[in-house]
Amino acid sequence: MARNFKNTALRLLGRRDLSRAKLVAGLEKRGCERAEALRIAEELASEGWLREDLYISARIRGWIRKGYSPRAIALLARREGLTLPDGEIERAYEELGTDEGAELRKLLERRARTWGGERESERARRRLLGAAARHGHEPGKTFNELGRRSSMVKRKRDEETPGG
């Protein structure tokens, strides 16, 4: 008995938005021939069931919230087989009301919180630099943010010290 792979595709899309590449891979995993999977994906896209634009938009926003840089987001999208429309990453930053610097600061603060008392140690600075690099941020921008953060902590400490 031949399987109805279009229904399988609709079930997959019913769970969550998928990219065309992920839908095709999901169908192939379930025994569908590649040519047939590509045809089904094209058919579902033309019928409006496969909304790759919504999937791309959601993925970009998720990567931004996780602290990835625009350069890293473009690389991650390419690895997933996504073609980003021109300006899509910048548009997502605008819609979220943030920018790369603000997301880098959030990432550094989130990571610094997990290390408790060693926040200002050289080891902590190296770890923060590594975390930012793994998220695609340039070392120069990260050093600037770490320097700004360190200055704020020192100022706060001086204000709290009696007679200082």
Image: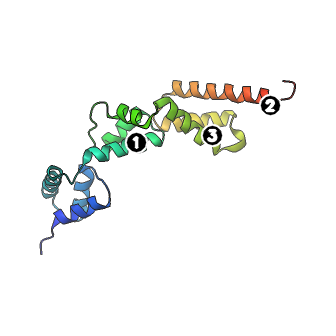
Give how far apart the Cα atoms at labels 1 and 3 are: 23 Å
Residue type at numbered disc 2: Glu
Which residue bears the numbered disc 1?
61
Which is closer to the viewer, label 1 or label 3? 1
**Cβ–Cβ below 8 Å for labels 2 and 3?**
no
For label 2, count other residues whose C-alpha is less than 10 Å away and answer few (under 14), some (14-19) or many (20+). Answer: few
Which of pointers 1 and 3 lies earlier in the amino acid sequence?
1
Residue in the picture at 50% in, 29% down: 101
Which residue bears the numbered disc 3?
112
Quadrant in which residue 61 is drawn: top left
Instruction: Point out the image quarter for the C terminus.
Output: top right
Residue type at numbered disc 3: Ala
Which residue bears the numbered disc 2?
160
User: Is label 1 in a helix, a strand or a loop?
Assistant: helix
Give how far apart the Cα atoms at labels 2 and 3 are: 21 Å
Residue 6: x percent and y percent? 17, 62
Residue in the picture at 28% in, 61% down: 14
